[in-house]
């Protein structure tokens, strides 16, 4: 909801359908997915694709954010911890 996605958008994402997103968003999600599931397979070609949409600093940010989310999930999920998000202030 905070990201501006409707329930149909979330359903599409859960099914691996990124077609509703921009090319830049699709590249980021594909890369984050690969970092999450098969980081050992990341290679130079992956960076060629990313550099079509992102500069070097943004690529580092993408890696850091994916790593932070993965770390958070690996700590909270096994412990059954629910993350709390404060309500957005308008």
Image (tube, rainbow, N blue to C red):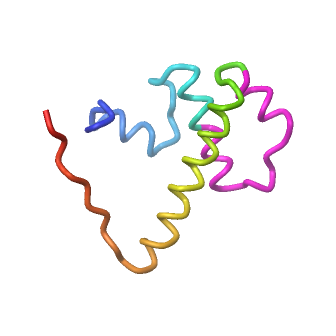
Quadrant of image for the N terminus: top left
Q: Is residue 38 magenta?
A: yes
Quadrant of image for the C terminus: top left
Q: How many marks?
A: 0
- Residue at 73% across, 54% down: 39
- Residue at 81% across, 50% down: 41
* Residue extending furthest toward the left: 90
Position in image of residue 11 (x %, y %): 37, 41
**Relative to 10, residue 73 above or below:** below
Position in image of residue 75 (x %, y %): 48, 73
* Residue extending furthest toward the front: 57
Q: Is residue 19 magenta?
A: no
Left or right of 78? Residue 3 is left
Position in image of residue 88 (x %, y %): 19, 41
**Relative to 57, residue 33 above or below:** below
Left or right of 46? Residue 5 is left
- Residue at 41% across, 80% down: 79
- Residue at 47% across, 43% down: 15
Q: Quadrant of residue 14?
A: top left
Position in image of residue 2 (x %, y %): 27, 37
Magenta region's main secondary structure?
Answer: helix
Image: magenta residue range: 30-51
* Residue extending furthest toward the bottom: 79
């Amino acid at each position: 909801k905070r990201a501006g996605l409707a329930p149909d958008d979330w359903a599409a994402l859960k099914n691996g359908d990124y077609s509703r997103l921009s090319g830049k968003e699709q590249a980021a999600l594909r890369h984050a997915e690969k970092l999450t599931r098969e980081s050992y397979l990341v290679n130079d070609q992956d960076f060629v694709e990313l550099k079509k949409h992102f500069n070097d600093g943004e690529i580092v940010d993408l890696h850091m954010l994916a790593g932070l989310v993965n770390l958070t999930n690996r700590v909270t999920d096994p412990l059954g911890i629910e993350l709390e998000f404060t309500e957005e202030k308008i």
